[in-house]
Image: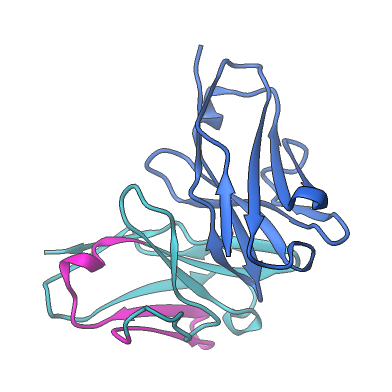
Amino acid sequence: VQLKQSGAEVRKPGESLQISCQTSGFAFGSYWIGWVRQKPGKGLEWMGIIYPGDSDTRYGPSFQGQVTISADRSINTVYLHLSSLKASDTATYYCARHYNQYFDFWGQGTQVTVSS
Amino acid sequence: FVLTQPLSVSESPGKTVTISCTRSSGSIVSSYVQWYQQRPGSVPKTVIYQNNLRPSGVPDRFSGSTDSSSSSASLTISGLTAEDEADYYCQSFDDSTWVFGGGTKLTVL
């Protein structure tokens, strides 16, 4: 099982960004894939999750309407779209496979810096 | 619901430490509790899942439990080593919402 995320990004406030999470080694359409944010020096925050099998998507209350999660089954990849970026979106973003209420395999993380 | 953890705990090498995770509403036993270890600069790693199960490769010095009377879960680490120094996060689930505790910094003195 592997989840490989796209590389570090630097953006200006107001810009948009899409992070990818390419998976391999398991049946992509049969597992939920989640996104977790970690701001510098802070804890883990669950952002949302998608079931690529039918694109059913759930969002955490703090992230509903703020981010978009999608999946492309043809390339076993999940995406996290962040728009209207602010300095407070500076963080490391992790994708993680979900199994039976927990996250068993994690991507390596994508560091996002938002700065003018 | 919210999962509350102590900000920090510390203990000496070879000793045993317990980290608590208290659920603010609902029953702690209504969903599984997991524990993740995150060393500085590293990806979170599961050390306990489904309340008290250890993934392969995690030493049996790590154990988990839940207590419905206090609506809390605990992670216990025995025989502490310097390698155990890390942040630990509990996590649970309810009604299509996944929640992480705020994290506890374990210092091995």
Seen in the picture, residue A55 relative to B6 is either above or below; the reply is: above
Q: Residue at x 69, y 43 (%)?
A: A63
Q: Residue at x 50, y 52 (%)?
A: A44
Nearest to the observer: residue A68 or residue A28 = A28
Q: Residue at x 54, y 87 (%)?
A: B68
Whole-percent x, y for residue A68 in the image: 76, 40
Position of B89 with respect to B14 (left or right) is right
Query: Does the image show residue B24?
Result: no
Which picture quadrant has residue B2? bottom right
Nearest to the observer: residue B23 or residue A94 = A94
Q: Which residues are magenta?
A: B60-87
Colour of chain B as rendered = cyan
Q: Residue at x 57, y 15 (%)?
A: A12
Whole-percent x, y for residue B29 in the image: 60, 84
Colour of chain A as rendered = blue
Q: Residue furthest top?
A: A116
Seen in the picture, residue B77 relative to A38 is either above or below; the reply is: below
Seen in the picture, residue A34 relative to A13 is either above or below; the reply is: below
